[in-house]
Image (tube, rainbow, N blue to C red):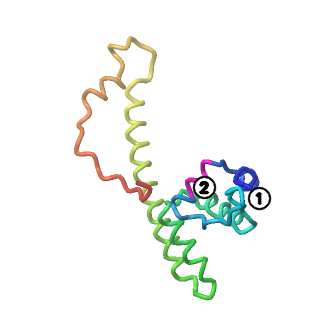
Amino acid sequence: MKIGELAQVAQGTVETVRYYEKAGLLPETARTAGNFRVYGPDHVERLRFIRNCRALDMSQEEIHTLLGLADHPQDGCGAINTVFDEHIAHVNERIKELSNLKRQLQALRERCQSEQGVDACGILQGLVAMQTTAKPERHTHLG
């Protein structure tokens, strides 16, 4: 199948397929005499694998690692568990960060409980008065 067919079957786009090829996540393909790439079922499976990893918010590096591990089916799955454990730790840290952000936003929102003039808006006053510190390092592995 050609690249457009692959993208359609794997529910992606041609641009995504090309991106993953350049990133080394999809293996090189055979070419026709007319220099068109020819894709097979293995490419569909791998592209779906990548898409599903991205749906789990996994980084390109994590996906690359998992694909490398998947290419050695005789090995144990301990390294795969490690990748997932690390990813779960990233997710937990991000949840903490988002919970803190939510608390800050709710505290600001509570400062303005009624319709009033903008000059008396507790939210805007809170934003002006809010003490900022150095922005904490965001715990994301996605970059």
**What is the chief secondary structure element of the magenta stretch?**
helix
- Horizontal side of 70 relative to 101 (left or right) equals right
Label 1 crowding class (10 Å Cα cut-off): few <14, some 14-19, many 20+?
some
Image coords of residue 10 (percent x, y) = 72, 56
Q: Earlier along the polypeptide chain: callout 2 or callout 1?
A: 1
Q: Is residue 83 above or below residue 142?
A: below
Q: Residues within 10 Å of mark 2 (few under 14, many from 20)?
A: few
Mark carried by residue 55: 2
Check if residue 106 falls in the magenta segment: no
Q: Secondary structure at mark 1?
A: loop
Element class at badge 2? helix
Kind of residue sitting beneath label 2: Ala
Residue 123 to residue 27: above or below: above
Marks 2,1: beta carbons within 8 A: no
Front residue of 29/35: it is 35
Q: Nearer the viewer, residue 128 or 112?
A: 128
Task: Return the residue found at the far top.
Answer: 117
Report the residue at 61% width, 66% height from top. Answer: 28
User: Which amino acid type is marked by label 1?
Assistant: Met
Q: Which one is closest to the eye, mark 2 or mark 1? A: 1
Q: Which residue is mark 1?
A: 1
* Residue 40 percent coordinates (x, y): 74, 65
Task: Give the x, y percent position of residue 111.
Answer: 37, 27
Residue 126, compared with residue 121, is above or below; it is below
**The N terminus - image quarter:** bottom right
Q: Quadrant of residue 129?
A: top left
In magenta, the rendered stretch is 15-20
The image's mark for residue 78 is none
Q: Position of residue 11 (x, y in %)?
A: 71, 51
Q: For this rendering, which residue is in front, 63 or 138?
A: 63
